[in-house]
Image (cartoon, grey):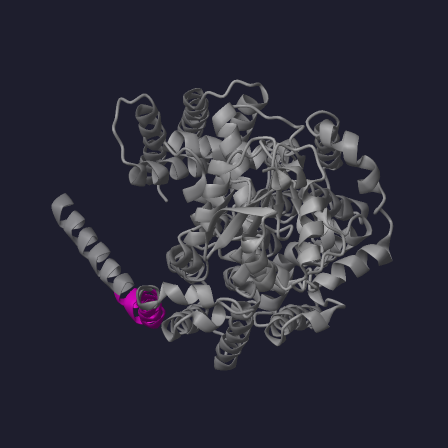
Amino acid sequence: MTRATMSVVSLGLLASGALVAAALLDVLAMPTAVRVPLVLLFLALGPGHGWILTLRLDNLTVEVALTAGLSLSMALGVSLTMAALDSWAPLFGVYILLGISLAGALLWFFSSRGRASMQAP
Amino acid sequence: MILADSSVASRAVEIEGAGRADTLVHRWAWPLILLFLAANLWAVAIFTFDRDTLLGMTDLGLAPLLPWAFYAAIASLLVGFALLLRSAQPPVALVVLYYATLIAVWHATPAILYATPRYPFTYKHIGISAYIQQYGSLDPNIDAYFNWPGFFALSAFASDISGLSTPFAEAIFAPILMNVFIVAGVVVLLHAFTNDKRVIWLGAWLYLLANWVGQDYFAPQAFAYALHLMILGVYVAWFVRRSWASPAPTAASTPWLRSAMLVFIVVAFAAVVASHQLTPFMTIASVGALIVIGLGRARLTLLVMVGLLLAWFSYMAQTYFAGHLGSLLSSVGRLLENFTIASQVLAPTDAASLSAERLLVLDVRQWLTLLVAALAAVGWLRRVRGRHREWVPVVLMLVPAAMVALQPYGGEIIMRIFLFSVPVLAYFAARAFFPARTALPARGVTVGIILATTSLAAGMTVAYFGNESMNYVAPDELQVLDELYTQAVAGSLIVTQTDNAPIKHRRYQEFVYSDLSNAVADLSYAGDAEELDSLARALTDNDYEETYLLFTRSQGANARLFGRLTAVDWDTLRADLDASPGFETLYANDGGSIYRVVSVAEEQAP
């Protein structure tokens, strides 16, 4: 995928997180049928996508899989911390994950070095 | 001139584009047609299915009820995928569509037909997440699940930000999402073994057709399992040499990239540790084994993993271990005993109490496991004959078996061992067809793939759907459960028919639970009124607010499938309970009954 395509995907993922936050703030009325897929998309790919793209693995399948693994692990970390500290605040959790997503996306966008590929003989 | 150049260039691009499209249509016409056909056949199967027949499920489960269109859809997918593999580089998008369709056919079918969460245990998991949503905190004193709450906190968070009050709806469709996530993990692991795309795609395909264990529902083990596979994939690719003679790991790397991958491993492993008891041991054992035999590097990774596990045990799971450490350690090292307990799940010693259909399902599971193992053995032999000695997959395949020395895991350890070995078995099974890279596989290979995958799919339909009579919680049964949690007084004892009841999805922490075999040792019932009185006395001999007895359809199926409480005539017992003054019927329908057990003093009061 080209850099332009990846930028669009990245913006889309950030937008999905922003829409979820907007729905939580009651700024945007969103039916559950739309909100649930958006939440799944954001949690499964948002927080990790920029960080994994920065690695430039040259293998889209592995990149998507690791993005899902990293994103869900980070989302789990955020939600578990809130529950363990008796500080359950879903909107705050979305903000944190949006911040992680944005930081990763910016890192990927501005990074141009560090090329590697995952190859086996 | 510039204009002329650009028009020539654009014409060239057009021709190239048309040529590519032409090639795509010709080369992938049959796989595309068969995929389209499969999707339509599946839709026909779903729309023509008579849901009333679900209540008549026998001990063979869902397989005999599924219409011809369902099987035709699977056949179409199997043939199409085999044709897809005739190319060395099948288009990733088409492969992903095939995976998605197979996962939909296999896992969305029960989700759509049932419209309720599958598996009785799912209901407990819903209840834990609902508790976190409601109270926004954890109470490790409630039970073991609250000592490993990572997955439940995540699902509670997802439900909350989706605007759902509980993850009930998520749980219905969770098997689909879990299988997508797990297959992603399998693909990462197989990429670490080889870069032969055909082997990777076929391996993951065989995995989907061979994993009958059913640990892919709304459960922490499914989530942790996918992460475990990804951790192993990353570790093998970047930190493991293929053989003792190889100078470096397989994936191209820089120190910065290796550091980033270590961070990935640590973050993902922390999520595994926080979610499930058994999986971190499997991960540590696998990584540890590779280091011990001298192929794995980054020993510090192992130390960090062990440190994370110990930190979790001594802090977050401290409450659980304080009460259970003795019983947990008592199984360690009892290899034979653990194996005997576990093997009874696959081949029960009291087979006489099981129906012929149930025995057939158990047999099919064993044959399916043997078929996968046999295909893997052929693949391994073909690799060895081709002078490709692959030690890393062999080690990862064998390590899970060592877990039997630690725990029988409630008799489930054999299934867990298969679960953790099956991605590597699937890899070697794929090697049976593609032992080395070839430009165009012989027709015999394609035919062989079709035959092998058809055999696996046939076995899988029986093996995977074989427990559905107890996994299906019908809407009327769900109504019984909802009534229970509407009427029951907090602080009461709820006695279930079996220990595998669809309970706790609401008011998780408010009740104490037991099951009949636990509450009344050697329970038998053949219609004797005295037995009924002694049952009432035994159930009310406690200090709880009230005692409730819960009978439901899926529990009856569970008792039948596993040969539990065989001395009880359930139909007679329920009929007599309805008429007994010792048991007040709070609610009853075809899906089950709730009885309030009346104490002797209350019964004798005027």
Q: Is residue B62 magenta?
A: no
Q: Quadrant of residue B100?
A: bottom left
Residue B229 placement (x, y as % from top left): 60, 48
Q: Is residue B30 magenta?
A: yes
Residue A20 placement (x, y as % from top left): 34, 29
In this view, the residue in front, B262 or B23, is B262
User: Which residue: 78% across, 58% down?
Assistant: B341
B66 shown above or below B133: below
Quadrant in which the C terminus of chain B is drawn: top right
Residue A115 placement (x, y as % from top left): 50, 38
Q: Residue furthest front?
A: B606
B139 shown above or below B379: above
In this view, the residue in front, A113 or B97, is B97
User: Which residue: 68% across, 44% down?
Assistant: B539
Residue B222 seen in this snapshot: no
- Stretch of the chain drawn in magenta: B22-42
In this view, the residue in front, B317 or B564, is B564
